[in-house]
Amino acid sequence: MPREDIHTIAEAVSELLRPNFDNIEKLIEDTCVKKVDFQKVKSNLLKQHYEMDGLKQYMKRENLRVCNFKPEGDLTDAVVDLFNHMAALKPPIQNTGADGRSSSWIVDSSVGPIVERSDISTCHMSNPSKSGAKPQILVRFVSRQVIRRIYLNKRKLKSSPNEVYRAAYITDDVTPLRLRLKNVVSNIQGVEKCFIKDGNIHCDYKKVHKILYSLDIYFNVLKVDITDDMLKVLGVTDYL
């Protein structure tokens, strides 16, 4: 077939289809764009964001952070000494001194160690170059059983006769999102005593103790409205 005839046929077909181009374009738009539920897509993205945070927190279960403690010498030996000093503390027979103030606790040398160096997998300073931040030591253990023993004794540090140990405190190693959420929950009206344990947020809400296990049901458990300010603090506004 001559080239001229092919061109003539193509022009004729194009003329026949041209009136339907708008309809074809609208059909494509309706199928590919308008029928997509963007709110549902964003909701699924937020859910995946929560699930990813849960996986990150799961990876931190064997970790603790020792805060406001910057020893000299070997870091691992120093935190082992701290943990065992803490476990050996006991209240004095006389709880108040001559001036009526509470006495420091004493160290019971008969108490054996609760942590050995072999119980620690890794130990290092966290963000040592961050300006103005309190020193934090990230400690990863080989077993969560050791962490439980530490948690049973960690409140004793406040009564230590050693000033350096007394200033230190021990916390969970949590994801930034959970830490931000803890701050949000702490500011909810009716919430008293909010803290993190085992990666979950605990709080007393209207005199009832609540444990918030999963990020995506926190506000359902507390039965409070989520405000824009809360979402900004959590950093999840892009998903909503």
Image (cartoon, rainbow, N blue to C red):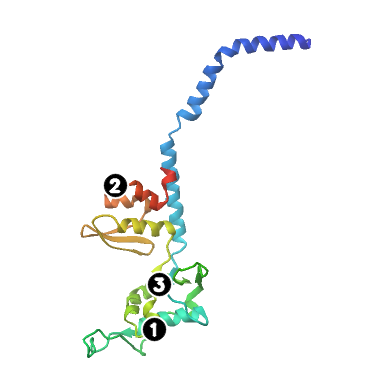
Mark in the foreground, 3 or 1: 1
Q: Identify the mark nearer the N-term, 3 or 1.
A: 1
Q: Quadrant of residue 202?
A: bottom left
Above or below, comparing residue 171 to residue 74 in the picture:
above
Q: Residues within 10 Å of mark 1 (few under 14, many from 20)?
A: many
Q: Which mark is residue 225?
A: 2
Residue 55 in view (yes/no):
yes
What residue sits 44% from the left and 39% below the top?
41
Q: Which residue is mark 1?
A: 85
Instruction: Name the amino acid type tagged 3.
Output: Ile
Give the x, y percent position of residue 151. Answer: 36, 73
Give the total number of marks visible in the rendering. 3
Which mark is nearer the camera, 2 or 1? 2
Question: Residue 95 at x, y = what percent?
Answer: 23, 86
- Tell me which residue sits at (46%, 28%) in the image: 34
Name which residue type carries label 2.
Asp
> How far is the residue under mark 2 from the one under mark 1?
45 Å
Q: Secondary structure at mark 2?
A: loop
